[in-house]
Amino acid sequence: PHHPTQKIVGSSPEGFIRRSYHLTFLQNMNNAQQLAPHQQQELMREMEQNQLKESLTLYNRVVDACVRDCVTTFKSKRLDSYETTCVENCAGKYFAATARVGQRFAEIQAKTAQKQQGA
């Protein structure tokens, strides 16, 4: 159930990153220098709201996927040791993958900015 303009990066749920959002972010950063100060502030507020929304979406995906994969019964109100370890490992993989994707986008952005300065 993804929007048709969204492209999913990665072959598993850990790789769900909305590429269109990140490309828009890069374009906005490049265009921000041409805006008036009050418009730059509005753009920054909008980008912060989008970042918060993306963070919450990622958190919800992690919880949903990891609980679905790791918690098999609800006999107790606490997770057993296997479930706890499984959820911790699962969440760690999600966040490591997300951090790596973010790092790659930052590298691409830096290269793009460097090319624009040289042009």
Image (spheres, rainbow, N blue to C red):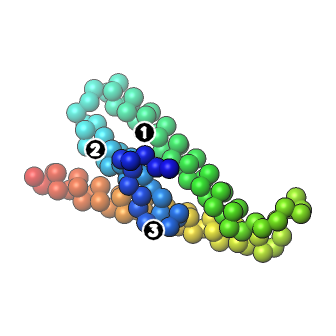
Which is nearer the N-term, disc 3 or disc 2? 3
Is 102 rendered above or below residue 12? above
Where residue 74 appears, x then y in whole percent?
A: 84, 61
| SS assignment at label 1 | helix
Which is nearer the N-term, disc 1 or disc 2? 2
| SS assignment at label 2 | helix
Residue 97 visible to an observer of this rendering: no
Residue under the image location 72 percent in, 68 percent down: 70
Q: Which residue is mark 2?
A: 27
Q: Which residue is mark 1?
A: 47
Where residue 104 appears, x then y in whole percent?
A: 37, 63
Residue under the image location 69 percent in, 63 percent down: 68
Residue 99 versus residue 68: which sits nearer the camera? Answer: 68
* Label 1 to label 2: alpha-carbon separation: 12 Å
Quadrant assignment, res 45 = top left
* Pair 3/1: label in front: 3
* Label 3 to label 2: alpha-carbon separation: 26 Å
Q: Which residue is mark 3?
A: 11
